[in-house]
Image (tube, rainbow, N blue to C red):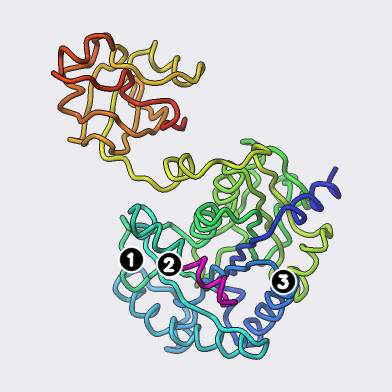
Amino acid sequence: MNISSRQKAVKRASSIVVKAGTRLLTDSSRIAILISQIAKLREKKYNVLLVSSGAVGLGMKTLGKTVRPKKLSEVQALAAVGQSKLMSLYEAECRKFGFHAAQLLLTAADIQDRERHLNVLNCIYSLWSENILPIINENDSVSVDELKFGDNDMLAALIATMTRSELTVLLTMVDGLFSLKEGKLDKRISVVANLSDEIKNMATGTDDSAMSVGGMSSKLRAAETVTRAGEHLWIADGTDPEVLVKIINAQDVGTLFMPVSEKQMDSKKRWLTFFSKASGKIIVDDGAAKALSQKGRSLLPSGITGTEGGFKRGDTISICDKSGTIIAKGLSNYSEKEIGKLMGRKSTEISSLLGYDGDEEVVHRNNLVLC
């Protein structure tokens, strides 16, 4: 099974997102090795996108600092120092193989806003069409907590989901996910078919350092996102100078995470699930919660007990049960003000209550995803 799983993941891929962590990018020789591997993937006609950490780490090295500062403005300053140096190194290495690098610095808001999301996506596709390597990093110099992805593992997962890239590779300092025995790392897990709670509990902070942010826990969160969208994610040892070549040759390295479903999530549901920010909430009764979560039904006005947020028609909203737990997200056919008139009433009463013929459903099941 493991051999066929790896072969399937590679055969299916036409686009690959590669993420390299800070500890893999602390000197020019490591960057040279990484780009030489990416060049080999490109020779095999893969569209490759690199999500690169390292700006803050390179800024620290440039300024002779050994401990990552806690003050946001100081981290932002280090990112500003390091980012230009990092891209200069990347461009120099890419040119050795006859192609160029392009830099995209993003905040979470850039992919949560629909228009900006599409602009970023079209930019990536244009770069690929021009045979240019897109290199993406979080814009640390302007990001604040509410606009952050959290770490570049999640950024890579979201970019992969956004571009419908069939394979994401997270390069780290260890050879994948290991089982635990008496609290210590035991055996490498080759393939994960189901990202269960037991698997999640195996995550340890083996990738932490003074310069990096993420660890194995963040990589498993990234795997959860990618596999839910219907794609593969591979965690592998970035210190191996041939690791990317081994992966596309379906060799048994690292840990491969299999998609939840053979069917890739469609574009609308990707947007709702991973990117669209809710403008408000609709609270529903037990019957409506069951109809949504267990029977795949649309949300009707009769099951609504309350609203929050001042949302408008067409906005993304969270749907919560009576305990406040979010059970779904969807696009509302009505504004909060209109729903105030409709909640608890039958769909047949909508026209008389609003004065016009509206949709029977407050949220249609085709515009709804379960959480």
Percent coordinates x, y for residue 173 in the rendering: 66, 67
Q: Which of 131 and 82 is in front in this view?
A: 131
State the quadrant of the N terminus.
top right
Q: Which of marks 1 and 3 is nearer the N terminus?
A: 3
**Three-letter residue code for mark 1:** Ser
| Whole-number angstrom distance, CA of label 1 to CA of label 3 | 32 Å
Badge 3 element: helix
Residue 299: image quadrant is top left
Q: Who comes first in sequence, dot 1 or dot 2? A: 2
Secondary structure mostly seen in the magenta stretch: helix
The residues bearing labels 3 and 2 have C-alpha atoms spaced at a distance of: 24 Å
- Magenta highlight range: 123-133
Q: Residue 169 carries which label?
A: none
Instruction: Write down the residue under mark 2.
Output: 138
Residue 130 sits inside the magenta stretch: yes
Front residue of this view, candidates 158 and 25:
158
x and y percent of residue 231 in the render? 64, 48
**Residues under numbered marks 1 and 2 in contact, where contact means CB atoms less than 8 Å apart:** yes
Say if 208 sits above or below 229 in the image: below
Instruction: Name which residue type carries label 2.
Output: Glu
